[in-house]
Image: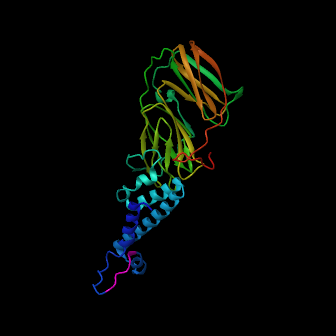
Amino acid sequence: MHPLLRAVLLLAAGCATAARPAPSASVTTPSPAATAASAPKLSGPVGERADTLRQAAGLLERAESIREHGNKSNAEQLFSSAEILVGPEPLASIAPLFREGAPPRAQTPLVQLPMSTPAQPAVSGDSQADEPDVKPARGALLGTLRVEGQPLRGVPAVITLEPADGKFRRRRPRHAIVEQRGREFAPHLLVVPTGSTVAFPNFDSIFHNVFSRSDSAAFDLGLYRSGQSREITLDKDGIVRLGCSLHANMSAYIVVISQPHFVVTDDAGRFKFRSLEPGRYKARVWSERTEPSIREVVVQPGDNTLAFDVKARVPEPATDKFGAPRASAK
């Protein structure tokens, strides 16, 4: 056992006897463990604190045993539970033992959100809805995304457009929500402009631990309970794949983009851009079940159509926060 962890456990084991009078010199002093076992149960705030420390010590002992057997994810969960009981400061010196190899722990504060907060939609991402008061342009683009000749069904895809010359005004960052409700993330697919801030409230009666190992945004929000939320600002373009350390079935994606136009396909793979300046555009598509693809599109005044056919791909296997494969994933 690591020396620092042993010291923490000994301190917790001896805390229950701290309120008792010191024995006289003529009495043989028992070991701290034996004294804790034979000591009468304390009441009041001192007893409650002693119970809390004993619970934390038990969690740390189990965490260390599991860590020594190679199960980093479960060990870290138990260690985080001990942190909730006693706070992170007393355990800061041994935290690296349990967190090495995991994404950086987020430092943003936990805030409380009302449980009456409305549920989020299954998907969210439409640049046209972000600026409803903008004067409509003269072009429109309607299309269907097909996967090797068949309409995309079952999962949404993101279609983005940008002027082919690369000159465009970036969209303003916004505030968005990915909630945890019914042991699922919602939205399952969220599209936001680069620089946006996303809150991750927990509306379940159980703990969750949201994390991402993605190159564009790696983070670990830690364990937090019902009604609590933590935020992350996403400053880099890319695909952010979300998971929950406690529930392998939970997954979601945040697509962070700088392109000025974006929309999410419907259940039949259809999409529509209602207001575009005529000209040449680069169209890009992404979904969790298709290969990323790009093509050039010419938008004329009036309605235009686009049949976008892409290749299928097998979704990447889910991993825990340490990168180890998970038994099941949604």
Is residue 244 shown left or right of residue 172? right
- Start-end of magenta stretch: 27-32
Extreme left residue here?
Answer: 25
Up the image or down, 75 lies above or below 307; here it is below
Residue 15 placement: quadrant: bottom left
Question: Is the N terminus in the top left, top right, bottom left or bottom right quadrant?
Answer: bottom left
Is residue 219 shown left or right of residue 300? left
Question: Is the C terminus in the top left, top right, bottom left or bottom right quadrant?
Answer: top right
Extreme bottom residue here?
Answer: 26
Up the image or down, 6 lies above or below 275; here it is below
* Residue 230 in picture, x, y percent from top left: 42, 47
Up the image or down, 202 lies above or below 86; here it is above
Res. 227 in view = no
* Residue 123 in picture, x, y percent from top left: 56, 37
Front residue of 187/292: it is 292
Is residue 278 shown left or right of residue 231? right
Kindly report the secondary structure that dominates the magenta region of the rendered protein: loop
Q: Please check the rendered image and state whether residue 230 is part of the magenta-colored stretch, yes or no.
A: no
Up the image or down, 285 lies above or below 184; here it is above
* Residue 265 in picture, x, y percent from top left: 61, 30
Residue at the image point whose x is 35% and y is 74% from the top: 44
Number of marks drawn: 0
Residue 310 placement: quadrant: top right
Residue at the image point whose x is 39% and y is 71% from the top: 13
Residue at the image point whose x is 51% and y is 26% from the top: 128
Res. 69 in view = yes
Front residue of 269/241: it is 241
